Amino acid sequence: MPGGQRPVLFEGQMRLVFVREGPLVAGIGEARVILVDCDDATRTRRLVIDRAQPELATATMMTWAAFLRREAEEGGYDVLDTSQRSLKCCVARICVELVPAGRG
């Protein structure tokens, strides 16, 4: 990273356009926005079975996820589909983005 800057990872459910505006307003030119996503069946299984939070597996949640997918596609953002990938594989993919080439 330029000038010895360290990478920063922001994680959460938020509008991608807002995530992209922050670095632009702050004058940070080197920022990547990646939507970490999964298909609705996987999301439902993870919420209901893996996390024991069935109250979150709603039509509203699925609509929100679809909205973010469309926003990523329209904005040209990368999408990491975790539906068929292990957690280890997904973490490795994100780490590749955080560690600049030649510094890994």
Image (tube, rainbow, N blue to C red):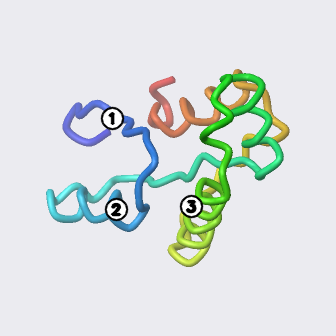
Lateral position of residue 95 relative to residue 40, left or right: left
Q: Nearer the viewer, mark 3 or mark 1?
A: 3
Q: List the single residue furthest toward the bottom.
A: 74
Q: Earlier in the sequence, mark 3 or mark 1?
A: 1
User: Which class describes the residues within 10 Å of circle 2: few (<14), some (14-19), or many (20+)?
Assistant: some
> Compared to 84, does 26 lie above or below?
below
Q: Earlier in the sequence, mark 3 or mark 2?
A: 2
- Tag 1: amino acid: Val
User: Can you tell which quarter of the image residue 64 is in?
Assistant: bottom right
Lateral position of residue 67 relative to residue 8, left or right: right
Between the C-alphas of marks 3 and 1, the distance is 25 Å
Q: Earlier in the sequence, mark 1 or mark 2?
A: 1
Between the C-alphas of marks 1 and 2, the distance is 14 Å
> Compared to 19, does 86 lie above or below?
above
User: Which class describes the residues within 10 Å of circle 3: few (<14), some (14-19), or many (20+)?
Assistant: some
* Residue drawn where x is 43% and y is 61% of the image: 16
Q: List the single residue furthest toward the left.
A: 26
Residue 20's tag is 2
- Tag 3: amino acid: Trp
Q: Nearer the viewer, mark 3 or mark 2?
A: 3
Residue 89 in the image, given as x and y percentages of width and height: 73, 28
Residue 92 in the image, given as x and y percentages of width and height: 64, 27
Residue 68 in the image, given as x and y percentages of width and height: 55, 63
* Residue drawn where x is 41% and y is 61% of the image: 15
* Residue drawn where x is 34% and y is 62% of the image: 20
Does dot 2 land on a helix, a strand or a loop? Answer: helix
Q: Which residue is mark 3?
A: 64
Residue 55's tag is none
Q: Nearer the viewer, residue 72 or 2?
A: 72
User: Which class describes the residues within 10 Å of circle 1: few (<14), some (14-19), or many (20+)?
Assistant: few
Residue 8's tag is 1
